[in-house]
Amino acid sequence: LKAGITIFVTGGAGFIGSNFLNIMVPRYPEIHFVNVDKLTYAANLENLKMIEALPNYTFEQCDLVDAVTVKALFERYQPNCIVHFAAESHVDRSILGPAAFMQTNIIGTFHLLENCRAFWGQNTDVLFHHVSTDEVYGTLTDQGYFTEETRYDPSSPYSASKASSDLLVRAYHRTYGLPIKITNCSNNYGPLQFPEKLIPLMILNALEEKPLPVYGQGTNVRDWLYVADHCEAIWAVMERGRVGETYNIGGNSEKKNIDVVRQICSLIAEETGKDAGDLCRLITHVTDRPGHDFRYAIDATKIKSELGWFPKEDFASGLRKTVRWYIENLDWVDRVRSGAYTEWMQQNYNNR
Ligand code: NAD
């Protein structure tokens, strides 16, 4: 990642992409970052207001499904590196309407790969970094961890579409020699996450004293990673990871969903003076998600031992920071919740 290169950051207006740009654009003024984003409901350019005026940052609105526009961007910027965040990312939405997931996650990735192949040829001084999820591995019982060798066994249309994109990326390496790296990460949380995902949804509902909908008994287990730690891990792999390799990224922070929600209730009680017991009584158990994976847990030994990456934020302090961020940014929440998002939530979640 030398001075003077251009990096395409796809999906840079979404949750993880915008956190990534907010960290990397000021840190690396000699690298040109081009944020390539369609601006779906999940995107918000306001997330990037700290960096939008910096000379090494450019935004390009582009739907990766539109091959003509993707090619034009490659022609205009001649990128040396792609870090591919753009995706439809919400499992519940993929169950209700999988088509957009197939288009963006599979066809969109294919269009990027095709342009890399065409523009880069046999150049090895370039990189396609694919950002993916641990959900491609399916589910675990009480024991064991996902390693880079775990067989793919996705359960939802979302994870199947991400698994497909991972396989395409790997095939372009084996068939065409494209320099690629893949990271598969556990659940992220932190500032700027769209309020349909578990942690911000619970924080905001608890603040508004609305029901806290928990799937089934809430015993499903997720491994949580603070978003800034994920961004640093991606950068470490981009810089120092081996070409053609996959690295799992996780937070060593396995929690039952119900315990996460209870912890959020206590933190909000501490921050606002509300009663924690009253907040916990808002927990409502709703019909479980079909195909709901029981447990995800990551073995991140490879990235730790090869690259010396470790998560810096523990769950308790990261969650407190996140709760505070939402309390301090309720105007941001109001704006992202307006319009299309509210309509969708009312149509699809009115049983909650
Ligand atoms: P997000 O939904 O917040 O953001 C996705 C971004 O992609 C949005 O800005 C959206 O406008 C853009 N996008 C969607 N379709 C597009 C298209 N056709 N063309 C161009 N841009 C498009 O997602 P996120 O949570 O930031 O996740 C980013 C990536 O990280 C995804 O690939 C996801 O699979 C992966 N990931 C997420 C998590 C997590 O916990 N959020 C964990 C592991 C991996």
Image: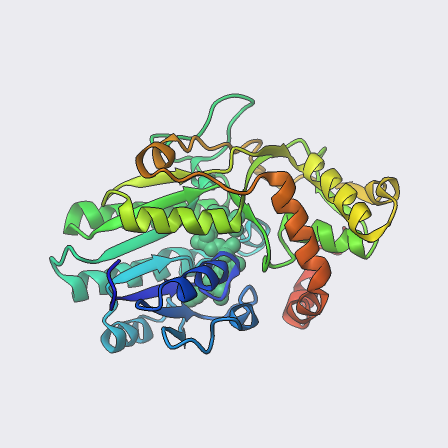
Direction top: furthest residue: 143
| Left or right of 310 on screen, residue 175 | left
Q: Quadrant of residue 259?
A: top right
Depth check: give the residue in front, 338 or 334.
334
Residue 187 percent location from the top left of the image: 53, 44
Q: Quadrant of residue 81?
A: bottom left
Q: Which of 236 and 27 lies nearest the eye of the viewer?
A: 27
Residue at figure coordinates x 51%, y 44% from the top left: 156
Q: Is residue 287 left or right of residue 112?
A: right
Q: Nearer the viewer, residue 28 or 348?
A: 28
Q: Quadrant of the N terminus?
A: bottom left
Residue 272: where, in percent of width, then height? 82, 53
Residue 35, x across and y down, in percent:
40, 69
Q: On screen, 231 above or below 112?
A: above
Residue lying at 53% horizontally and 67% vertically, measured from the top left: 43
Query: Viewed as shown, does residue 293 lie left or right of 231?
Result: right
Please state which of residues 219 and 66 is positioned toward the viewer in this rendering.
Answer: 219
Q: Is residue 99 above or below residue 218?
A: below
Q: What kind of colouring is applied to the model shown?
A: rainbow
Check the image and report above or below for 261 versus 234: above
- Which residue lies most toward the left here? 122
- Whether residue 168 is visible here, answered yes or no, is no
Question: In this view of the protein, can residue 137 be seen by the observer?
Answer: yes
Residue shown at 46% from the left, 48% from the top: 230
Q: Position of residue 222 (x, y in %)?
A: 57, 36
**What is the total number of numbered labels drawn onto the structure image?**
0
